[in-house]
């Protein structure tokens, strides 16, 4: 079974995607959270040119999506972080570590030329596995 997770507080979905999908596999659930960027529910970039505030905003969005899916940050098994400037790693890492200290997931950090929204300099997607 597959269940879409699209919180009411988030920006309206304009394309064919979900904020998250919960998939039942035997006695477990896998939750795939789509890449989250620092964009408010009116499609405005949050804290342009401030990677720390954008990173906090994105992790808070992920946390709230997981609450909607009856999960939490401690269930994360994989995280992929996309940044537009690898030099921001030293600013992102402490925030990442704060939010992921209980899960210690496998992790990938990739530099990209841009995200889908101008002035959003970080995108994070996560995968969760948990018992039903």
Image (spheres, rainbow, N blue to C red):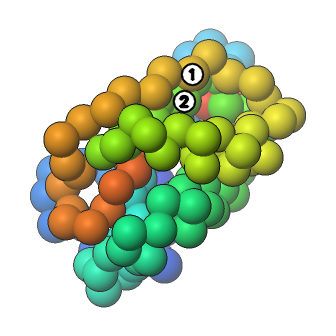
Q: Secondary structure at mark 1?
A: strand
Query: What residue occupies the far right of the structure in this picture?
Result: 102
Q: Is residue 52 something one can see in this rendering?
A: yes
Which of the 4 image quadrants contains residue 14?
bottom left
* Residue placed under numbered mark 2 in the picture: 79
Q: Secondary structure at mark 2?
A: strand
Whether residue 63 sits left or right of residue 17 in the image: it is: right
Task: Give the CA distance from mark 1 to mark 2.
Answer: 5 Å
> What residue sits 23% from the left and 51% below the top?
115
> What residue sits 78% from the left and 29% below the top?
103
Query: What residue occupies the far left of the structure in this picture?
Result: 15
From the top left corner, tell me how far across and down residue 58 is, in percent. 52, 58
Quadrant placement of the C terminus:
top right
> What residue sits 37% from the left and 81% below the top?
41
- Residue nearest the observer in this picture, 125 or 110: 110
Seen in the picture, residue 82 relative to 15 is either above or below; the reply is above
> What residue sits 57% from the left and 21% below the top?
107
* Residue placed under numbered mark 1 in the picture: 107
Whether residue 24 sits left or right of residue 4 in the image: it is: right
* Dots 1, 2 in contact, CB < 8 A: yes
| Mark 1 or mark 2, earlier in chain | 2
From the top left corner, tell me how far across and down residue 40 is, in percent. 40, 78
């Amino acid at each position: 079974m597959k269940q879409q997770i699209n919180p009411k507080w988030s920006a309206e979905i304009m394309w064919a995607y979900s904020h998250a999908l919960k998939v039942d596999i035997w006695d477990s659930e896998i939750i795939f959270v789509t890449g989250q960027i620092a964009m408010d529910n009116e499609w405005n970039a949050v804290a342009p040119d401030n990677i720390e505030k954008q990173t906090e905003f994105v992790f808070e969005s992920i946390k709230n999506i997981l609450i909607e899916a009856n999960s939490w940050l401690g269930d994360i098994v994989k995280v992929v972080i996309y940044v537009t400037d690898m030099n921001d790693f030293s600013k992102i890492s402490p925030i990442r570590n704060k939010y992921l200290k209980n899960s210690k997931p496998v992790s990938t950090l990739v530099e990209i030329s841009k995200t889908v929204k101008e002035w959003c300099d970080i995108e994070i997607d996560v995968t969760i596995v948990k018992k039903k």
